[in-house]
Amino acid sequence: MPDRQLAGETYLKFQLAPQVPAVFAASVVEEATVLPAAQVTAIPNMPPCMLGLVNRRSRIIWIANLVKLLGMPVPDRPRQEYSLVTVKSGASLGLMVDEIDGIIHLPVTAFRPLPSQANPILLPYLRGCAVQADQILLVLDAEAVLQSSVFQRQ
């Protein structure tokens, strides 16, 4: 069942991967932007999902490939620009997504139980799903993403 406190709210819609639409609650989104790939400084010996660091508004922010972070298979393709969604929940993290689609409002009636074909790898990161214009949107939990085991390495 969807998290009712998020129903009827504003969301940032994006393509997690091609043909995989998803949303974050707008309340956890700090920024959505397109950034030249050259501005991201790669750091050696990091998990494969970590793209590096970027200086944004006098703050250093880690950048991760969200699809890889979630454990989904993703074909690597060279990029000149990154579509980034910066989420916050105590700490901030920049998440590379395939494409940013904009702000939407999802009424309570848009929320549905998770489909049985939902990728089990994604379940810890999902708050539920919603339907908009005959599209199933994954409602991602930013806190769960920020608590990913990738960031718990010692």
Image (cartoon, helix red, strand yellow):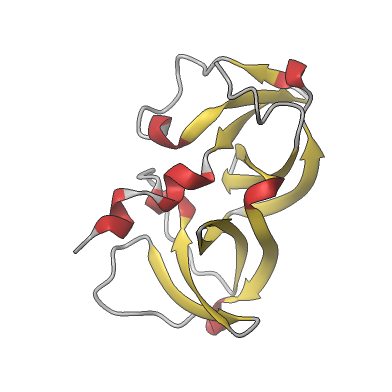
Where is the C terminus found, in terms of image quarters? bottom left
**Residue 74 vs residue 61: left or right?**
left
Q: How many marks?
A: 0
Is 121 located above or below residue 31 in the figure? above
**Residue 82 vs residue 31: left or right?**
left
Q: Residue at x 27, y 56 (%)?
A: 152
**Residue 49 placement (x, y as % from top left):** 37, 60
Q: Please identify the residue farthest to the left as the structure is shown.
A: 154
**Residue 123 placement (x, y as % from top left):** 41, 29
Q: Residue at x 52, y 46 (%)?
A: 142
Of residues 92 and 15, which is closer to you in this image? Answer: 92
Q: Residue at x 68, y 48 (%)?
A: 27
**Residue 120 placement (x, y as % from top left):** 36, 27
Where is the N terminus found, in terms of image quarters? top right
Q: Please identify the residue farthest to the front as the structure is shown.
A: 90
Please identify the quarter of the rendering in which residue 85 is found. Answer: bottom right
**Residue 30 placement (x, y as % from top left):** 66, 60
Please identify the quarter of the rendering in which residue 55 is found. Answer: bottom right
Please identify the quarter of the rendering in which residue 22 is found. Answer: top right
Of residues 44 and 89, which is closer to you in this image? Answer: 89
**Residue 25 vs residue 140: left or right?**
right
**Residue 74 vs residue 38: left or right?**
left
Is 32 located above or below residue 107 in the figure? below
Q: Residue at x 58, y 21 (%)?
A: 2
